[in-house]
Amino acid sequence: MIDFSPTTPRGNGILQIRLPMAGNPLRYINGYLLEDDDGLTLIDAGWKADDVLAALRAGLHAHGYQLSDIRRLLITHCHFDHYGLAATLRRAGVGALIMHRLDWQLARDHLSDPAEIDRKADDWIARNGLRVDVSLDEELMHNRTELAQPTRELEGGERIGRLRALWTPGHTPGHLCFIDERSGAIFSGDHILDPVTPHVGVWRDTGTDPLGDYIASLRTAAASRASFVFPAHGEPFADLERRVDELLAHEAEREGHVIGQLGSAPRTAAAIARALPWTRRNRDFTELSAAHQQFAVAETLAHLEHLRVRGVVVRKEQPDSIGYRLTAAD
């Protein structure tokens, strides 16, 4: 039986602390507290909210610790549900804040002018065929995070106490997993989840291939041969290679669905997304909330851009719209 108590000891000096995500179907994010030779390490902090801070304090207190006992906070990636509480914890006495250089850059860009970043993302999704009003969702998200400068920026490969940083871009450019040299486990952030499939989307025209990065990073993580997986959402699980194979198969299946909607005439990402099933329940696009419709279009764009990088599709741009068609139709 899965233990849904607020904190669960996981052996090898690892404590799982479930930090609430009120109003979100995922219910909680996992913070992982590790005992190390030089003190405590916390992986991920949850979003900025009083109930999250209270849950973290309670989890620490139940095992004889307090916030100031945390020597370092490691951030798997800069999304608000992982990084949002970081500034609060630094003010409370947490010694060090560590994250990847690229995600610090992303956090700095997004939080310096969040309204402008949101406008650009909305305009980009609109050029790809979908215009919706998600201002309330965006405002709520920004209220749950705060800019906090890291004391150390990583590139991947570094040792931090008992952990080794593994750069796994895709979900974000600077996403990190952490390999525990003591237990052999991997702390996978949002890179590898079960049964949820991580979001990989294209939210602006950067010329990058995040889905290609994600697929390569899945193989990098599998090559670690980690004995156990501690994800940021959901419960820890064994058999890393099995889950990586499932995620790779899912991306291949989605790619097939996307290709099946393409022909000789350009179609927008939104038109393609409207024809695809969504979520594990195979919901219709119209059943999704406005915000999740945007996520669906961004994910479809990730597949289309990955296909474009490989020469399978061609992108056709007009002043107010972008469409994709098969290269073979030339």
Image: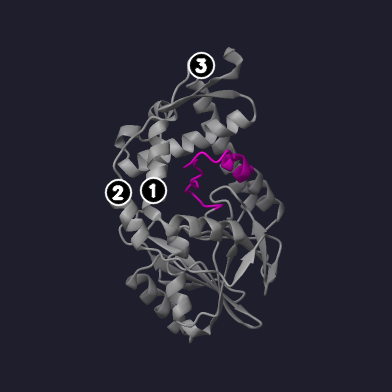
Kindly identify which residue carries mark 2.
Answer: 135
Among the two numbered marks 3 and 2 on one chain, the one whose residue lies closer to the N terminus: 2
Instruction: Confirm or deny contact between disc 2 and disc 1 (CB under 8 A).
Output: yes
Position of 279 relative to 180 (above/below): above
Inspect the image, locate mark 2, and give the three-letter code of the amino acid beneath it.
Ser
Instruction: Please check the rendered image and state whether residue 277 is part of the magenta-colored stretch, yes or no.
Output: no
Snapshot quadrant of residue 48: bottom left
Above or below residue 230? Residue 250 is above
Observer able to see residue 238: yes
> Residue 217 at x, y = what percent?
64, 48
Disc 1: CA contacts within 10 A as few (<14), some (14-19) or many (>=20) = some
Residue type indicated by callout 1: Asp
User: Which corner quadrant holds the C terminus?
Assistant: top right
> Which label number is shown at residue 262?
none
What residue is rendered at 70% in x and 56% in y? 224
Whole-angstrom CA distance, mark 3 to mark 2, is 34 Å
Residue 263 is labelled as 3
Q: Is residue 289 visible?
A: no
Q: Which residues are magenta?
A: 191-215
Foreground mark, 3 or 2? 2
* Amino acid type for the residue under numbered disc 3: Gly
